[in-house]
Image: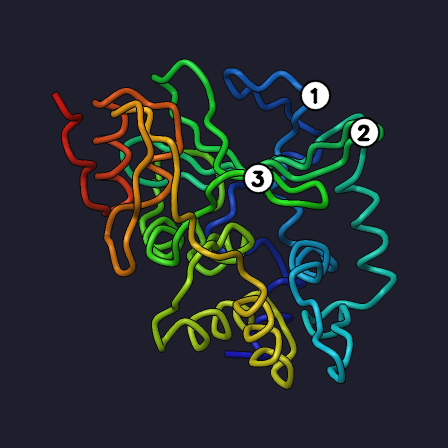
Amino acid sequence: MGPAGPARRRAGRLPGVSAVPERLWSVLIKGYGLGPLVVGERLLERAGFWSNHLLPWCRCAPGEVRAVPEWFGDDGADTDALSEVLLEERAWPTFRVPFGGGHSAVVVHRNLLGDYGVDYLRTHPDWPRAEDLSSYDGDWSGPGLSWHDIVHIAETPDLAAPGVHDTEARLLLLLPLLAEDELPPEASARVSAALADVGASEGSVQEAAGRLLRNRRPKARRAESPLSGGSCHIGPGSDESAVLWALGLTRSQSDALAGALGSGLLPASPQ
């Protein structure tokens, strides 16, 4: 699968990526008015994209070699060129990952002058505003997503909604959100396969996957529940998604999102 990735990416549009005209289209996210959002999905085809997206999470330990763009099938020139696009202050690239029940996870390059970062949002067309899954601007804030959440979203695209539908690209777009204490045995092979599929070098996919997973955040242990008005503890192995406790949702919204994530419903609020 390794050799097919670069050829597929450079030969044409990735399967599952919405066709977007060359001109930039505006994207409106309810409740998110920070800047000029534009459709970014077509950038997934461009050499240098995955280096920009994933290299920051391939930090090395003492004695390890430094990760380089070539791990992802790119070179330094491609990576630098696409970095300028991703950091454009007049057009903030936005990547939509639609999944069940009308929900989408959205990745926004927040290119405010002096306040650059990446915002990960959860949106729904019938809900009044976007919810923050996490933000990164040198430090993380927000609950992130569990391994179960990321895999479930990646594997349940809403094909009727605009955005990225390719399973492997979806998984890698959301992978920086990973907040988990323990991972299943198959996690490394799963990420390696996704990297190979988008064009990563066959000789480096295992090392890259290992670093991406090793540098994850710990699972959110305590969060204020918007449903009960108090704090809760999410135990090891729980099928309750930490993000359900952290977002400011109504009971019905939380139940709907739990169903879309394939997670257990939150317990009823105490009387």
> Marks 2 and 1, Cα distance to the nearest angstrom?
8 Å
Mark 2 closeness class: few <14, some 14–19, many ≥20 residues within 10 Å: some
Check disc 3 and report the residue beneath it: 141
Q: 157 or 71: nearer the eye? A: 71
Determine the residue positioned at 67% across, 69% down: 72
Quadrant in which residue 120 is drawn: top right
User: What secondary structure is found at the residue carrying circle 3?
Assistant: strand
Check disc 2 and report the residue beneath it: 89
> Marks 3 and 1, Cα distance to the nearest angstrom?
20 Å
Please state which amino acid type lies under the numbered disc 1.
Answer: Gly
Q: 39 or 14: nearer the eye? A: 39
Q: Is residue 20 visible?
A: no
Please state which amino acid type lies under the numbered disc 3.
Answer: Ser
* Residue 196 x/y as whole percent: 55, 73
Q: Counting residues from the N terminus, which is met first, the one under dot 3 or under dot 2?
A: 2
Check disc 1 and report the residue beneath it: 35
Please state which amino acid type lies under the numbered disc 2.
Answer: Glu
Numbered disc total: 3
Quadrant in which residue 104 is drawn: top left
